[in-house]
Amino acid sequence: MKCIKDFIGRTNFVVKAEEPSLKAKTLSQWEGYSAHEFPKVCIFILSVRRYSDNLTEIAYINKSGTKNFSAVIPNTFKVKELTAPLLLRIMDKLTVENLHRTLHRPSMTIGSDPEMFVEDENGNVIPAYLFLGGKDKPDKTSQGNYGNLPLYWDGFQAEFQTSPQGCLGWNTDSTQCGLKGLLIAARKFNPKAKVSSKTVVDIPRELLESGKEEHVQFGCMPSLNAYDMKGSQANGREISFRPAGGHIHFGINAYKDVKNPYKKEDYIKMVKALDAILGVACVSLFANQDNPKRRELYGLAGEYRLPPHGLEYRVLSNAWLIHPMIMNLVFDLSRVTLTFGYKDYLRLWNATEEETINCINKCDVALARKILKRNEALFLQLIKCAYGHFDAKYIKAVMKIFMKGMEYAIKDVNDVHSNWNLEGTWVTHTNSANKNTSVGMKDVIKGKKAA
């Protein structure tokens, strides 16, 4: 037997409660405690944390698994931990069934520094260095909500920064400002220029041979990798294509206790969960947009960096920029998945690490959909964590989009201009018609597609 205080910091385990004195005079000291909800039987503990010098707070699920509770009890409360295989299976089942009640994402900002290509009227790439400044003297994104941010060339592709926000609506507005600023700058150079939906473009040999060294060579800092893999270190003049990335930045460090900072193994857990769930789901979602050639250079499974604000996940292409509703789906899933990994829930996801790596690195759509189908119950729960206000029809429709690809929900995946209202009016907080999940999913449920 152990005192409950000895379990502080632990999550997800089964105990048998052995406190003999559940008298009213004792209970009066226990804030929020109800005796009939904490019987002398086996219960599933969700978390244990210090409440005060003399009290410990536990979150637990009752034996029917239909509701979770919180209780503040004395540090001396006695419990016995149970680890029988059957109880562990019950614990995992309860975790999945109650995930939407217990998996609360931490406070974080979310942002990105996406890359996009620009094409002329014939579909040929217009190198971004012809009409944008470099990182040292960047142009600016348009001056809408959370705009006026750096916009610059990164080789042949354009790159821009978005404003990291706790609210995804405002961050999406900032992304629209980046795309619109890119179009404005490009059309000063070529009035018929358009923002491309392509994730990989071919580069003509004459541009590779005549371009300046700084424009042709790959200039990114090396990434870290959760599996210690490395992409090709090829000479830029010898590579006849260029890929564009859609890296996601999680601002989690500002909300972490400075006395208990994230450790390397914490970031690894987050990245591997993002790979197993978000990365695999996006292989399916981007089935007709992604090109596995991109991962010959970078964007391998497990790629990340650790900027001062937290974590940069570098696996995804820029395909989520095709439509703001797709961006919403990807970013919302990313936030709950990051938390899922940090809380050591990845053991509940039925896929091997080898499957995950192969699926992402080869853009294996069939394998991605096989993995998602195998984990359907858990994936639906993760969607429910992101969209607790959606009913079952909406939750299933979101999964269907990930399973069938973005064409299932988007009218024209190649029309970036219309999808983001780049030449029209954009309503702030992403409230233009069909530009967010709350509005756009209503049409998807009816069998319509978002424009």
Image (cartoon, grey):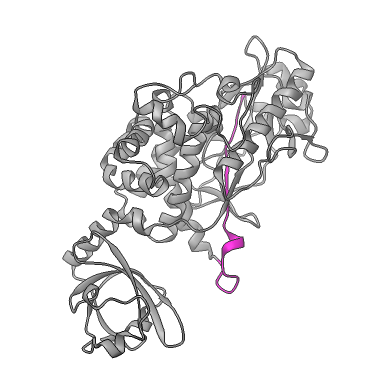
Q: Left or right: 137 with respect to 282?
A: right
What percent of the width, then of the height, locates residue 132?
78, 29
Instruction: Estimate the x, y position of residue 286 in percent, counting from the top left.
Output: 45, 30
Q: Is residue 422 left or right of residue 410?
A: right
| Pick the front one: 296 or 255 | 255
- Image vertical order of residue 253 relative to residue 430, above or below: below
Q: Quadrant of residue 59?
A: bottom left
- In this view, 277 is above or below 40: above
In this rendering, would 97 be left or right of 411?
left
On screen, residue 420 above or below 335: above
Q: Is residue 241 visible?
A: yes
**Quarter of the figure with residue 206:** top right
Residue 169 lies within the magenta run: no
In the rendered image, residue 265, in percent from the top left (x then y), is placed at 49, 63
Tell me if residue 351 can be seen: no
Residue 248 on the magenta segment:
yes
Residue placed most toward the observer, 334 or 425 = 425
Question: 151 or 332: which is nearer to us?
Answer: 332
Is residue 170 or residue 15 the one in the foreground?
170
Vertical placement of residue 80 versus 140, above or below: below
Q: Specify start and end residues of the magenta stretch as a single range.
A: 240-261
The N terminus, quarter of image: bottom left
